[in-house]
Amino acid sequence: VVDRPRPATLEQLPTPAAVIDLARVQRNTAHMAARARRLGVRLRPHVKTHKCVAVARLQVADHFGGITVSTLAEAEHFAAAGFDDIIFAVPIAPGRVPRAVALAARIGRLTLLVDDDVAIDALEAAATHGAISVCLKVDCGYHRAGVDPTSEAALGLARRLHAAPNLVFAGILAHAGHSYDCVGADAIRAVAEEERAVTVGFAERLRAAGVPVGEVSVGSTPTSMLADDLTGVTEIRPGNYALFDVFQASIGSCTADDIALSVVTEIMGAYPDRGSLLVDAGALALSKDPGPRHVRVDGGFGLVCDLAGTPLPGFTLVGLCQEHGKIRLSPGTPLHGLRVGDRLRIMPNHSCLVTALHARLYVAEGRRIVDEWRPVRGW
Ligand SMILES: Cc1ncc(COP(=O)(O)O)c(C=O)c1O
């Protein structure tokens, strides 16, 4: 990233620019830290949402300091910044094992995730200079990854991990990604209870079979925001909550006022006769995440706001090309005097995808830019 003087205000940012509202990210991270303490679990936040050391430090404040990552690039970056208890929470692909094992030798604890014998073979073969910490991934209803906790195969893998001389069986881990299919707090609470009950039930099954289980790790942002009871769980791993986004607000895990990430964009075309505007935030600034189509089919690619962050009713971001965003105005919607050269702010559908597209994230207090954070990118 080329160094250049930091702009002083939202008006001076080179557009499109990803902006983090400092007060909101501080409020969001403090809220989750307090929730975890109230529920009696440790907080091991996922950092993939922002990939920035500064946000991770806010997330772990008042907790034990452990984090969750989704790439080895994140693991190496955060380890270099002093984080020394990290879970790499995607099933380890054998090709990544040498790099993961090399990192594990340099930090306090790097825990890897498995749900297959082939991956365990690769770890056993690589663990020649010390034991490797491993978690077993459990499917708690999302069906993206993980073992079926009722199966014999799941018990067999856990027994193998427990018995392996050069592996440390750290525990079990589940992620209720299907909480994103919910609408409303009650539906999310039901998935949170499913995530807890399935995972804790599996831990009890393993213990009854003579396999000790340490960590019982669960968590997504919706379930972590709404769970009432986490009996039997040892840690939660939400990540998106640091920034939130339109998706989370639409399904009911936050309100639009909690969204801490936006993309500042400049109007580069105005077509009042056609009822549309063209902005310079396209798919490479906002991603093409369609948002919560099960809540609203025509919600567009983000929430269009004025530069102060107030939503503009009747403005819908209906289309994205690589570097163009097309905003459609509903019939009768006032243009508010907006012209080419004016600025708007888009709250994204999915923050985790947006931060990964930007080389720097500007940090704002109101309209003032007070800092600039650089997410680690790549894999
Ligand atoms: C394994 C795992 N844990 C935790 C999380 C964090 O969940 P969320 O993004 O809802 O905060 C994710 C997100 O994809 C995940 O894959």
Image: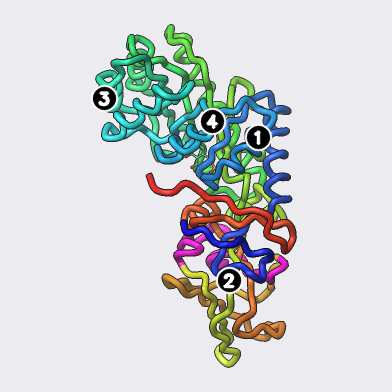
Q: Where in the figure is residue 378, as x and y percent of width and height?
A: 39, 48
Location of residue 283 by image quarter: bottom left
| Figure quadrant of the C terminus | top left
In the rendered view, tell whether residue 190 sits above or below residue 313.
above
Q: Earlier in the sequence, mark 3 or mark 4?
A: 4
Number of the front mark, 3 or 4: 4
Q: Where in the figure is residue 156, as x and y percent of width and height?
A: 33, 17
Q: Earlier in the sequence, mark 3 or mark 2?
A: 3
Q: How many marks?
A: 4
Number of the front mark, 1 or 4: 4
Number of the front mark, 1 or 3: 3
Number of the front mark, 4 or 2: 4
In the rendered view, tell whether residue 158 sits above or below residue 371.
above
The residue beneath circle 4 is: 82
Please name the residue shown 60% across and 84% down the image: 340
Asked whether disc 3 touches disc 2, contact meaning CB atoms under 8 Å apart, the reply is: no
Looking at the picture, which amino acid does disc 4 mark? Answer: Gly
Q: Earlier in the sequence, mark 4 or mark 2?
A: 4
In the rendered view, tell whether residue 332 sits above or below residue 263.
below
Instruction: Assign a secondary structure to mark 3.
Output: helix
Asked whether disc 1 touches disc 3, contact meaning CB atoms under 8 Å apart, the reply is: no
In this rendering, position of residue 311 left or right of residue 357: right
Looking at the picture, which amino acid does disc 1 mark? Answer: Ala
In this rendering, position of residue 30 left or right of residue 246: right
Marks 1 and 2, Cα distance to the nearest angstrom? 36 Å
Instruction: Assign a secondary structure to mark 4.
Output: loop
Marks 3 and 4, Cα distance to the nearest angstrom? 28 Å
The residue beneath circle 1 is: 227
